[in-house]
Image (cartoon, grey):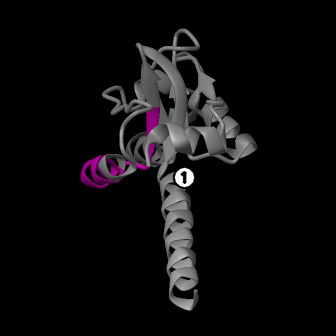
Amino acid sequence: MNVAVILTRKGRDVVTTTPDTTMAAACELLETKGIGAVVVSHGGDRVDGIFSERDFVRAIARQGAAALDQPVSEHMTSRVETCGPDDSVAMLMRRMTDGKFRHMPVVESGRLVGIISIGDVVKERIAEAEAEASAMREYITA
C-alpha cells in the first residue's frame, strides 16, 4: 500500500495558514477543524513549515501566554519532512517513528497535494490486517 491509496480514501484536503497568522488564531484553527497540525504556506500549494500541537506546547513552555500573539512562523517547524504519493506506507511509518512526528505533508512535483497523519496510517494498517485475517478465515473454512 502507498500514500496515494490513503489519500484516495481520506481525501486530499489540507488546512493551511500563512506565516503571519498569530499562534492564537492557528490554535483556534486546529481546534475548530479537529486536527493536530496545520501546514504553513505563503502560497496554497507550497510547504513553508508546519505548526503542530507540539510546536504550541514548546512555545508556551518557553514564552508563556505572550507567545499567543506572535506569528506562527516564529514557532513552526520549518524543516518539514514530506513524502510523495508513491511512497510506501512502511517507509512512511519508519520515517514518522524515527523522526518522532505525527504529520507529513504529501508533495508532488513541488506542490502540496495532501497530508497524512499517523492516525491515517494506523487506520489503514488495521483495515489491511483485518482484510488479511478475513481472507485467511475464508481460505481455512473453504
Residue 104 in magenta stretch: yes
The part of the chain drawn in magenta is: 93-105
**From this viewpoint, which residue is outermost toward the top?**
43
**From this viewpoint, which residue is outermost toward the right?**
32
Q: Position of residue 40 (x, y in %)?
A: 51, 23
Front one among 110 and 128: 128
Front one among 80 and 23: 80
- The residue beneath circle 1 is 120
Q: Position of residue 62 (x, y in %)?
A: 38, 43
Going by the numbered disc 1, the residue's amino acid type is Asp
- Callout 1: few (<14), some (14-19), or many (20+) C-alpha neighbours within 10 Å? some
**From this viewpoint, which residue is outermost toward the left?**
98
Q: Where, quadrant-wise, is the C terminus in this rendering? A: bottom right
Q: Position of residue 105 (x, y in %)?
A: 46, 32
- The structure residue drawn at horizontal position 54% and vertical position 52%, both measured from the top left corner, is 120
Q: Position of residue 135 (x, y in %)?
A: 54, 74
Name the side, left or right, on which 19 lies relative to 98. right
